[in-house]
Image (cartoon, coloured by chain):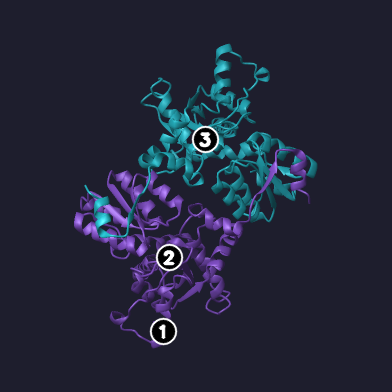
Chain colours: A cyan, B purple
Amino acid sequence: MALAVAKERNASVVAGATTGNAGSSMACLAASMGMRCVVFVPESAPPAKIAQLLVFGAKVIAVRGTYDQAFDLCAEVCARRGWFNRNTGSNPFTREGKKTCSFEIWEQLGREAPDWVAVSCGDGNILSGLWKGFYDLAAMGLISRRPKLLCAQSDASDAVARTVQHVRDIGQVDWMRVQVARVRATTCADSISVDEPRDGLAAVRAVIESGGAAVTASDADILAAIPELARGAGVFCEPAAAAGWAAVKKAAPLGLIHPEERVVVVLTGHGLKDISSARKVAGEPLVIDASLDAALAATEP
Amino acid sequence: MALAVAKERNASVVAGATTGNAGSSMACLAASMGMRCVVFVPESAPPAKIAQLLVFGAKVIAVRGTYDQAFDLCAEVCARRGWFNRNTGSNPFTREGKKTCSFEIWEQLGREAPDWVAVSCGDGNILSGLWKGFYDLAAMGLISRRPKLLCAQSDASDAVARTVQHVRDIGQVDWMRVQVARVRATTCADSISVDEPRDGLAAVRAVIESGGAAVTASDADILAAIPELARGAGVFCEPAAAAGWAAVKKAAPLGLIHPEERVVVVLTGHGLKDISSARKVAGEPLVIDASLDAALAATEP
């Protein structure tokens, strides 16, 4: 969506801050359109994500700082240079792109909405996009009720979850007055490591208006969810993605999700994008000499 | 296919030697079936591939040696332990699986065969599988002519290409007498680094009987093909996969492929499986301090 708008506006350069996932899509699509692409990443972004950006031809600027600092620098550079700024949460068109995920879920479930959609939350843009998508489906009369949204965060990057709790505590419904919490994010799930969620208010509102919930999981629980998903569902995903499943596992025993409800977990990034996290929980290979004796010893029943 | 047969035979353990691609499919599917999976890899297999195997729950045995040594050890261990051996080229069912690639190409081209299918070649099993698939389509009357097969190898792992040349040189057509060359493979394209292609004879025959060709490219050309494919076709692939495109670029000026012919290049592995190779040709990020001055300097037109 964002790239289509950039093209419509004859942008010479499209830029964005990302830890790598939105960036690789942007770089790939920009290459296909012959448009220059500049990506600001925090220097700590996983090497695989940086490699992917470079392979697609993006100019990659690795900022010695946080995602939030990369975000602000990107916005300022775009303003000075007249570039098209795709930053998540400030560019309104990314949400229009994200909402198509709702259409896909609806289509793949045989034109029905599930009871819950669980997804990890960093900037909040996927949640706000999902909400908009289901809102549109309901407005078109294609679904009779919208799903509840489960916001999954790490307890080491929980700005949206904190704000959901705060709004519920005070019963605040004047959305113009709600302030999204700021945190100091330290989660290993890089894609959702966000101090200041740029689409946070819309995400909080989506969770509450859907009758959903926000749940945090520890980084240890998030990492443990990676092999569980791989072995149980056949999908190898990155930590941020696994947070969605970790949150479902926490929400169910709390009674938030009922046994008969249908839950879709959106997995938001491939495991090969961050193998160092995967290796922390996946075990190690057994290294042997190239001899039959060694091979038989290694495979002793 | 192989896993379905293993299940039919009530195998307790499925094992195979692989540099990682066949292995990750095997591990993923074995997990879904509750079957134990043991994978023998050369110790030099890329870390991402080993991580993927482990995440899917395979027991990974990293052999201090070549793929060929891992292959032989796997076969011997399977024979001793009564395990189901999925080794490419010795298990006949992998070819039956690979041939479905031909059906997909035919289907996606609107139920037509292309003029050429280009694909990288290690053990030769993809080539022999593609050939069998198109053979079956022709036998069923669904295509009137089979495509020519372009075997793509690194010049640092060229056993099949050498043998194709040898057979053409001597005009040998008694397939029972053809010996596949052995080489000392050193290519950086790990998935096609094979001293002794285990399905090599069938691959040589597929190339010759299809009226195709075998072309080698240097590792430098193979690596250069990675960003070309990413930027030109939107697909980030590993070196072995890129060899297919590198071979097409060599075959065209030789007159092997004509301008009006339709060529399908099969890309056989994702780029995130080997980012160190990608980084050799993709450039480097520009690392800056988190300041506007640094960001403006880095984005000077």
Neighbourhood count class around disc 1 (C-alpha, 10 Å): few under 14, some 14–19, many 20 upward = few
Which SS class for mark 1?
helix
Mark 1 or mark 2, earlier in chain: 1
Secondary element type, mark 3: loop
Establish if B166 lies above or below B102: below
Q: Position of residue B172 (x, y in %)?
A: 35, 85
Picture coordinates of residue A52 (x, y %)?
57, 51
For disc 2, the marked residue is: B193
For mark 3, what is the residue?
A188
Residue at position x 34%, y 59% from top? B97
Please indicate whether residue B219 sits to the left or right of residue B298 in the image.
left
Q: CA distance from mark 3 to mark 1?
A: 57 Å
Query: Which residue position is annotated with label 1?
Result: B168
Chain for mark 1? B
The three-letter code of the residue at mark 2 reads: Ser
Q: Is there any visible trace of residue B234 in the rendered image?
A: no
Please report, as a chain letter, where disc 2 is located.
Answer: B
